[in-house]
Amino acid sequence: MSLTKSLERGIQSATYNAEAEKAMREEKKQASEARQKYRDALFRIRDKKTDMVAKKEASDYFIINVDKLANEGFAWVTANPDADFQTITDKAQGTAEKFQELSKTNVIVLKISVLPSFLRTVASNALLKKQIKEDKKQALDDFATSLETWLKTTPTLTSDAIVSKEQSIDLELKTILQGTGETVPAVKTPQEAAKAEKAVEKKQVQVKKEEEADKATFQLSRLLKETVGIAGKVVGSLFIVMLILVSGMLTANDAIGRDPMYRIFYFIYGGIGFPVMLVYYLYKWFAGSAPHIYKLLPLYTQESNTMLGRFFLYPFTYAEDAAAKDAKIKFMTEAAELVGKTYRPPAEGAEEKLQSVLEGIQSIALNATSAAKKGTNTILKGLQGLDIVK
């Protein structure tokens, strides 16, 4: 045996304490058992949640937070393999207390979850029995909607925040349910919440049947009310359409100096942006620079030869005046300057003369030989490319 081994055995023999070793083994055993009991408790928590979900007794708040609690517990056990008995026991006790807190808060959330459908049913029933008026029904519906919105945030809230919200809701319910003859369903357990929800569903079916029976009964007041409501919607829709057309008309007429294709584009975007464009042209009207209105969408300067054509094209046919010609000259001049060119407007009467020349050439082209027709067609295309020739 080596000298080192002999020394090690000598030291162990001198310091060995049988009672201390026994106590240490016992403590490790207790810690191991406590750890296993904690794991089992975490599994039971998960199983309890699964059972409650199956019975529809668990809120989203409860489901999410119980999963979080169990996952944190398992993670702690893995990260602390050498934790002593007392530490594990304290951790398990803390988890059990947190689970009890989540269970109590779950009941509160379930109670509030029943309220939106309960309030809407109460509102419909009370209005049907003429216990409340339409504005009161709307207030109940709005309160129900606000509760639904709040319920979506509960998974991220603390237990204290939910308890505080319950208290404020109870105070509001006392006021908002006045005149309906209804009281808030008593919910103190998940089972009672499920029963209350079923009772509300049953009441909903009953109220719906009563509403259908009431609608089947003729009432002059209801007929007048529905007629006024429909008329209001129609008038409102027509008013919006009118605003869109007026805005498009103002925008298209403001672009009278541009080509017809641009006026169509201006009419469309003017109609789409009517709230802004109407304010803009109202400002221009006060400033004395509002556009002259030629037609709804001025596109053509020449009227149709038929009565039917004139009828259908009336909103699009306008008489070009000096202001329209000046607007075109101004636009062409500015466009030419942008590319470093100069625009020379046609002399007075030049357009009519060139139009006559164009018609003469067209007549010649129709009666000429193929060789001559080719030349006249070239001249014709050249004249048609000029801005001053329609």
Image: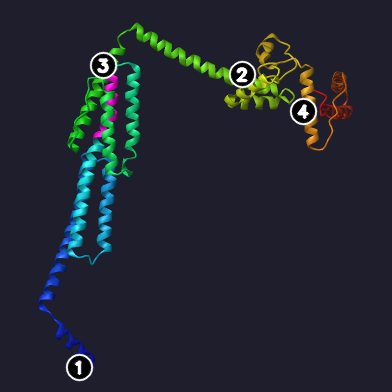
Q: Which contiguous range is marked in magenta? A: 111-125
Q: Label 4: which residue? A: 331
| Cβ–Cβ under 8 Å for marks 2 and 4 | no
The amino acid type of the residue labelled 2 equals Val
Q: Distance between the residues labelled 2 and 3?
A: 47 Å
Q: Which of marks 1 and 2 is nearer the N terminus?
A: 1
Residue 122 position within the rendered picture, expressed as x and y whole percent measured from the top left: 26, 22
Q: How crowded is mark 2: few (under 14 residues within 10 Å), some or many (20 or more)?
A: some
Q: Label 1: which residue? A: 1
Q: Is residue 360 magenta?
A: no
Q: Distance between the residues labelled 4 and 1?
A: 113 Å
Q: How crowded is mark 3: few (under 14 residues within 10 Å), some or many (20 or more)?
A: some
| Cβ–Cβ under 8 Å for marks 4 and 1 | no
Q: Residue 63 carries which label?
A: none
Q: Which mark is residue 210?
A: 3
The amino acid type of the residue labelled 3 equals Glu
Measured along the vertical axis of the image, is residue 146 above or below residue 355?
below
Q: Residue at x 85, y 18 (%)?
A: 352
Q: Earlier in the sequence, mark 2 or mark 4?
A: 2
The amino acid type of the residue labelled 4 equals Phe
